[in-house]
Structures are given as structure tokens and as C-alpha cells.
Amino acid sequence: METPKVHYRDLGLIDYKEAWDYQEKLFKGTIDQKIRIRNGESDTPTEHYMLFCQHPHVYTLGKSGDKENLLLDDAGLREHHATYYEINRGGDITYHGPGQLVVYPILDLDHFFTDIHKYMRYLEEAVIQTLAEYGIESGRVGGLTGVWIEGETERARKICAMGVKSSRWVTMHGIGFNVNSDLSYFSHIIPCGIDDKAVTSMEQELGKPLDLVEVSNVLKEKLAAQFGFSYHLE
């Protein structure tokens, strides 16, 4: 099988709704193309995208979430210069903000494997391998998504949250990876609906801020190696 090629796009610091709309456009375009192929109207293969970005302070609630896990009212959101969206991914509530590396893979899994559980584990593994490059040991917690440090202990703390949507095996949404995140913003939610575990960042674990571009480049390559794709240079 030919190695899939993925369009890599760094969106920089971008408003959450603007990035969401862009994801939706690519997501819908990919699904529409799959339908055209299935109906014999086109033989042009679907394309894949990997969007890297940061967001201004924002809280997002997934389809299975509970708004009670947001501990701020409208006035509190304004006070903290944060916005709030109820969105169409799985999972509960999470936070995005400057210093957090956000990755949105829009992949047609028909070109990889049709298994969402495996897809989530591959995303986690790429983050685990990225952390290992910086000497941070991490892993998974049984029954929970994301990447954790000392996950099976009383000191468990989450360093990367994940939530995805898929339709016709096309994915969107993805990874929120705390690199230099302001962790105080997590005190205003019950992250992912889990109230008995802490949240951390690479900066907190290492005691110094990281070069976000460098971390982004490491994760970019770990994702390519994990899924077996190459990047399409634009």
C-alpha cells in the first residue's frame, strides 16, 4: 500500500471557533469526496490533514459532558477572558489556551485502519513518545483516555486530553497537550469530568518552559511514525 500523505498546517494562535469552522470544512469536504468515490462520480483519493495550533483561553464541552463541570458563570468567563463552546466531539469538558499544543488530525481512516479505539491509542502513543524525548515517563490509565504521569498512583496527573469525532471513518478534533499551559485555568472546571486527579504540563514537570515549536516538531514526527504517513510539503 502506498504511504499516505498528510497536509501539515500550522495555524498559529487561532480563535477556537475559527479553527472549528475550518476543521468542519475539511471534514465535510473529505466525507463528500468519499461519497463521490463510492457513487462512481470521482476517482480522486481523499486527502488527509494535520492541523497544529494554539487557542486563546476557551472551555469546550463534548457531547457526553455535563455543563455542571464548568465552574464559571458568564461573568466568570468574562473575568478570565475565556470563551465557552458546546461541541460535537466525544468526551466531557476541557480547557485550551496559550502554551497548550492542540492537534486536529483530519484523516480518512480507510487509508489506515478502521478502528477508533486503536486510533485513540495511536494518538496517545505519539504523545507518550514525545514526552519520553524530554525524559518524562508517561502512560495510560485503564478506562480513561489521554496521557497521564504516574497514572496508576495517588499522584496521577493528566498531561494530555483527547476527544474526537468520526463519521464514515473520517476524524476531527483531537489532542490538547499541556506544554507551557497556565494550569490555573483548569481549577475552573472538573477536567473531563474527573474530580479526583490533577492536571500537569511539561513546564511543571521539568521546572522550566519549553520551546513550543520544538515540542511541536517532535510530536509531528512521532505522529507520522506511529501512523506510517509522510507529510505533504506545501
Image (cartoon, rainbow, N blue to C red):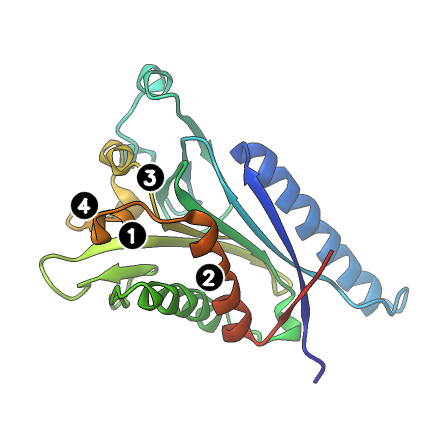
Spatial distance from mark 1 to mark 2, Cα to Cα?
13 Å
Q: Amino acid at mark 3?
A: Asp
Q: Of the residues tagged 2 and 3, which is closer to the observer?
A: 2
Q: Which residue is mark 2?
A: 219
Mark 4 and mark 1: Cα distance apart in space: 21 Å
What residue is rendered at 39% in x and 47% in y? 64
The kind of residue tagged 4 is Asp
Give the residue number, with chain letter if any, for mark 4: 195
Q: Is residue 177 left or right of residue 174?
A: left
Residue that lies at the very extreme toward the right in this rendered image: 41
**Counting residues from the N terminus, which is met first, the one under dot 1 or under dot 2?**
1
- Locate the N terminus by quadrant: bottom right
The type of residue carrying mark 1 is: Met
Mark 3 or 4 closer to N-term?
A: 3
Say which of 42 and 214 sits in front. Answer: 214
Pair 3/1: label in front: 1
Q: CA distance from mark 2 to mark 4?
A: 28 Å
Question: In the shown orientation, is residue 171 left or right of residue 74?
Answer: right
Secondary structure at badge 3 equals: loop
- Label 2 or label 4, whichever comes before in sequence order: 4
